[in-house]
Image: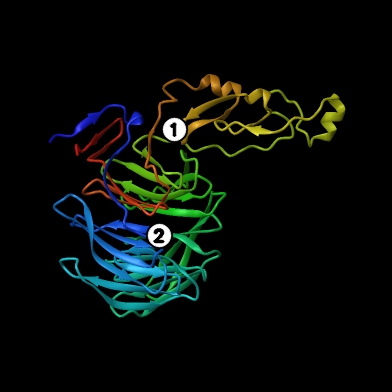
Amino acid sequence: MAAEIQPKPQTRTPVLLNKIEASQDVVNTAVIIPKEDGVISVSDDRTIRIWLKRDSGQYWPSIYHTMPGEYSSLISYLLSDILPVFQEFILSEDYNKMTPERTYEAHQGKVTVVLFVLEMEWVLSTGQDKNLTWHCSESGTQLGLYRTIAWVSGLQFDVETRHAFVGDHSGQVTILKLEQDSCSLVTTFKGHTGNVTALCWDPAQRVLFSGSSDHSIIMWDIGGRKGTAIELQGHNDKVQGLCYAPHTHQLISCSSDGGIVIWNMDVTRQETPEWLDSDSCQKCEQPFFWNFKQMWDSKKIGLRQHHCRKCGQAVCGKCSAKRSTIPLMGFEFEVRVCDSCHESITDEDRAPTATFHDSKHSIVYMHYEPTTGWLLTSGADKVVKKFTYTQLVFGSIAFKIV
């Protein structure tokens, strides 16, 4: 049946295709099995489950495997748990058997992220011991180790340059150059006020996206060598997942309040200005409350300092009493602007560059499969939900008829 085109995606939610509700505890991770209508899930109840879609249209587990520890992540069938080890499994072709292949004793604390790099035959892992390690996936031998400043919660890798992108609980993003048995520091990015919770790398555009507990997303221009950092403000809670759809130039983000945002990245976005320092309002010149000399000289009570989100100037509340969205600067919600900037913002400038949807559960993990248009969310409500975007086209989203 042909897809239905909805011209106003802001008023609609993505179609929910399936719900998987058989877990006894929070589902930490769920991923779509490539080239198969199936799902692998990991739960706090210490179970790994392989779900295959049956003729009834529902998902039923073909494998139910209980592990000795609570597993927190699953990438390419590599599992990490509360122990300082992670394990590798081999799945049979019919997905009805899972055989342990190798155990990696890589860390002195809980393993936080595991990443399998097929092209390099490497397994990258991070732990709460603040170590980043990489192993040979063929022999299991550790190749190298790097000590981070805080425990890592986000990890991405670029095969072409061998750059590892590391996001940690200090809010910093570090770029490392990995070799077969050595590592060198390339640079660090500091922009978040909370810990980094998710990373997403677009190798074509050479752009890195980072999400944080401060509710924000930052787009870092790596390949353009411009050093630009574009902020995206569209969530009301901690960002839990980021995925990029390269064929439509859209970023998909989710947060722990259940919000899913689809960002149009095929527009020319602007950097937010740095906030300026001043002892008095840069509009009316009234002193701020710490400027004792000017308060005494002018016999005026000092005012509280604010900042215009568009120009960055330090202003008082009277000179910045208005609010506006500034989507091209990433502000999809209304923010404080000074009076002159408010007058300069047109209705065209306020046109949204993102659409907002409610998954109706607290998301802890998200996985997107671009070839099928399937989006998988894992929730604190012990449920895995499968959505579909048959086309991710900004301005009109086509949903499958079910």
Q: Residue at x 56, y 24 (%)?
A: 341
Horizontally, is 311 left or right of 219 in the view?
right
Q: Is mark 2 in CB contact (under 8 Å) with mark 1?
A: no
Left or right placement of residue 382 versus residue 127 in this view: left
213 or 290: which is nearer to us?
Answer: 213
Between discs 2 and 1, the one toward the N terminus: 2
Point out residue 322 in the picture as x, y percentages from the top left corner: 58, 23
Dot 1 alpha-carbon crowd within 10 angstroms: few under 14, some 14 to 19, many 20 or more: many
Q: Secondary structure at mark 2?
A: loop
Q: Could you say which quadrant of the image residue 247 lies in?
A: top left
How packed is label 2: few (under 14 Cα within 10 Å), some, or many (20 or more)?
some
Residue 334 is situated, as x and y percent measured from the top left of the image, at: 52, 29
From the viewer's side, name the closer residue of 24 and 280.
24
Q: Is residue 297 visible?
A: yes
On the picture, is 345 further left or further right than 117? Answer: right
Give coordinates of residue 126: x percent, y percent: 45, 68
Cα separation between marks 2 and 1: 40 Å
Q: Is residue 105 above or below residue 176?
A: below
Tell how many labels: 2
Q: Amino acid at mark 2?
A: Asp
Q: Nearer the viewer, residue 391 or 123?
A: 391
Q: Amino acid at mark 1?
A: Leu
Q: Is residue 250 above or below residue 117?
A: above
Locate the C terminus by quadrant.
top left
Please tell me whether mark 2 or mark 1 is closer to you in this view.
2
Return the residue at label 1: 328
Residue 162 visible to an observer of this rendering: no
Residue ID for mark 2: 25
Q: Is residue 268 above or below residue 377?
A: above
Colour approach in the figure: rainbow
